[in-house]
């Protein structure tokens, strides 16, 4: 999926687990959701490594970041786990919640990358480097983009984005009503 689908996916997944994270108030909820949105985009920031290597901003068919360690579940789960342990040691509840959101949103991103991408992802890394996914095109860069936007997976991505916007508006409306009452 593309950046908007990942941002929406991270937000929506965090929204789904929000009750479980038991935020103290509205502002904490919002912070967690924004963190979820950032976490949803985070794995694709490895694009910057590609740009640095190339020495220019480009998006060609040799861009194969799904084969990198930055697109594996343990890469982020270990980071989230370390953050969580840091939260436990320092008795910092915010860190523990942030660790959970990071884990939820980055895992969502990686699962989204199994749908209609070029290669899929190394779903069971480090056990195997085999790439898994559904509707994989084998294409990369602009070629992937041209193909992907014509597939049902792109419509699924649009559905995720629209669902996120609707949920966001619904939540905002609900909270306003709530505030007026109290
Ligand atoms: Zn990705």
Image (spheres, grey):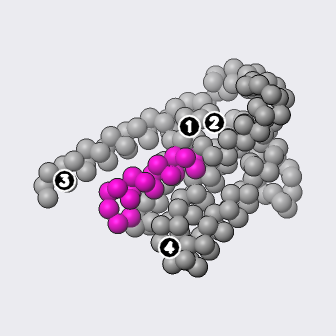
Query: Please, what is the dominant secondary structure of the magenta stretch?
Result: helix
> Can residue 16 be seen?
no
* Of the two numbered discs 3 and 4 in the rendering, the one whose residue sits closer to the viewer: 4
What residue sits right under mark 2 in the picture? 1
Closer to the N terminus: mark 3 or mark 4? Answer: 4
What residue sits right under mark 4 in the picture? 92
* Of the two numbered discs 1 and 4 in the rendering, the one whose residue sits closer to the viewer: 4
**Residue appearing at x 82%, y 29% in the figure:** 54
How far apart are labels 2 and 3 at the CA level? 36 Å
What is the tally of numbered marks visible in this picture?
4
**Residue appearing at x 78%, y 34% in the figure:** 52
Q: Which mark is residue 179?
A: 3
- Mark 4: few, some, or many residues within 10 Å (few <14, many ≥20)? few
Q: Position of residue 171 (x, y in %)?
A: 32, 47
* Of the two numbered discs 2 and 3 in the rendering, the one whose residue sits closer to the viewer: 3
Q: Position of residue 136 (x, y in %)?
A: 76, 35
- Mark 1: few, some, or many residues within 10 Å (few <14, many ≥20)? many
- Mark 2: few, some, or many residues within 10 Å (few <14, many ≥20)? many
The answer to whether the residues at label 1 and label 3 have Cβ atoms under 8 Å apart is: no
- Quarter holding the N terminus? top right
Closer to the N terminus: mark 1 or mark 4? Answer: 1
State which region is magenta.
Answer: 23-40
The answer to whether the residues at label 1 and label 4 have Cβ atoms under 8 Å apart is: no
How far apart are labels 2 and 1 at the CA level? 6 Å
How far apart are labels 3 and 4 at the CA level? 29 Å
Closer to the N terminus: mark 2 or mark 4? Answer: 2
């Amino acid at each position: 999926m593309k950046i908007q689908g990942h941002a929406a996916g991270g937000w929506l997944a965090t929204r789904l687990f929000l009750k479980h994270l038991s935020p103290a108030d509205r502002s904490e909820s919002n912070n967690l959701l924004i963190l979820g949105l950032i976490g949803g985009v985070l794995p694709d920031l490895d694009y910057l490594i590609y740009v640095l290597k190339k020495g220019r901003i480009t998006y060609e068919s040799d861009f194969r970041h799904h084969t990198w360690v930055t697109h594996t579940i343990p890469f982020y789960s270990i980071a989230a786990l370390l953050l969580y342990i840091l939260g436990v040691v320092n008795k910092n509840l915010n860190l523990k919640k942030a660790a959970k959101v990071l884990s939820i949103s980055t895992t969502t991103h990686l699962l989204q990358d199994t749908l209609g991408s070029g290669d899929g992802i190394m779903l069971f890394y480090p056990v195997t480097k085999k790439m898994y996914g559904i509707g994989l095109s084998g294409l990369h860069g602009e070629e992937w983009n041209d193909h992907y936007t014509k597939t049902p997976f792109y419509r699924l991505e649009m559905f995720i984005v629209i669902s996120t916007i609707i949920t966001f508006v619904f939540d905002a409306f609900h909270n306003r009503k709530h505030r007026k009452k109290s």
